[in-house]
Amino acid sequence: EPGLHLVATPIGAARDITLHALDVLNSAELLAAEDTRVMRHLMDIHGVPLRGRRIIAYHDHNAERQRPAILAALRDDRSVAYASDAGTPLVADPGYRLARDAAAQGSRVHVVPGPSAALAALSLSGLPSDRFLFAGFPPSTKAARASWLRQWAMIDATVILFESPRRVNQTVQELFEIEANRVIVMARELTKKFEEVIRGTAAELAADPRMKNLKGEVVLILDRPTPVVAGEDQVRAALQERLKNMTV
Ligand code: SAM
C-alpha cells in the first residue's frame, strides 16, 4: 500500500516481530532504516528477501539530507517502510520529522505497531498505568539532570525514562535526594537473556548492590508522588496555629 509505514521491530527477542511488520518489509518498494545493517539482519533472520531493493540510511546525522528523497517517493505514491534500530520509531528514535512532513504533504502515514521498551517496562513494573508520562533520556550533565528529574518527579503520573547503564546509579541517587520513599522500578535487558527487574523505594535502590555497574539497556520508572493526606491531629494542629495568629 502506498505511503509511509512506520515499522516497530523487536527490542531484544527476534520473535517479537509481527506478521504485519514482515508483510510490510516484504512488500515495501523502498526500505529506510536508522541502521541499514540492523534492518538487513532483521530481514535475514526472518527470511525476507531484499529482491534488489536498496535500504536507505535515515538517522539523526543525515535525516535533513535524506528526507527529501523519501518524501519524493511518497509523492510518487510509492510504499516506504521505515524502522529504527529497535522498538517503535519516533520513541526516543528518529522518524518524527519524516512522519510530520509526510502527513503535511498529504501522504498516507501507516503504523505497524509493536514492541517499545517504554511500554514493555511499564507493563511489568507493577506501577499504576492509568496515567503515565514518557520523559525520554535525562540530560547527561549533573546540574541539568537534577532539575530535570525534580520537574518530572512532581508530575502526578507514573514517569517512564530511558537511562544509560553508566548513569542509572547516579540517577537513582539523585531521585533518593528528591524523595527517599518514592517507589522506583529498574527494568533492564527486557526480552533478552539477562532481563532483570528491581523494584523498591529510592532509598532501597540507592543502597542495592545489584544497582552498581549495571550493563545493557535500562528503563527507569517512577511512581507518582504520594499524596499528602493530613490526619485529624494535623488538621487540628494547623487550625489551632491559624487561630493563634488571628488578630481580633
Ligand atoms: N524506540 C525504542 C523503543 O521504542 O523501545 C527506544 C530507542 S532508545 C534510542 C533506546 C533506549 O531504549 C535504551 O537506552 C533503553 O533505555 C531502552 N531500551 C531499548 N531496548 C530495551 C530493552 N530490551 N530493555 C530495556 N530497555 C530498553
Image (spheres, helix red, strand yellow):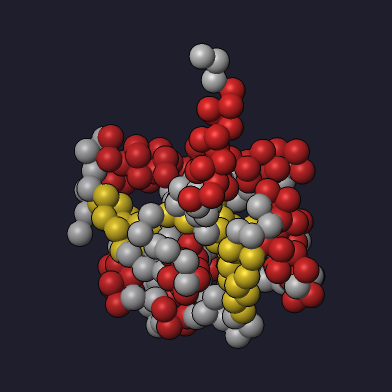
- Residue at 30 percent across and 67 percent down: it is 24
Residue 114 found in image quarter: bottom left
* Quarter of the picture holding the N terminus: bottom left
Q: Residue furthest front?
A: 248
Is residue 156 or residue 72 the one in the foreground?
A: 156
Report whether 226 appears left or right of 76.
Answer: right
- On the image, the x and y values in percent for residue 222 come to 55, 58
- Residue at 35 percent across and 39 percent down: it is 100
Is residue 181 or residue 144 the one in the foreground?
A: 181
Q: Residue furthest bottom?
A: 193
Is residue 101 or residue 230 the one in the foreground?
A: 230
Report whether 237 appears left or right of 104.
Answer: right
- Vertical relation: 31 (above or below) 67: below
- Vertical relation: 97 (above or below) 194: above
- On the image, the x and y values in percent for residue 62 come to 55, 43
Report whether 138 appears left or right of 238.
Answer: right
- Residue at 51 percent across and 42 percent down: it is 236
Q: How many marks?
A: 0
Report whether 179 appears left or right of 117.
Answer: right
Q: Would you say residue 62 is visible in this rendering?
A: no
- On the image, the x and y values in percent for residue 21 come to 33, 70
Q: Would you say residue 14 is visible in this rendering?
A: yes
- Vertical relation: 35 (above or below) 97: below
Q: Residue furthest top?
A: 248
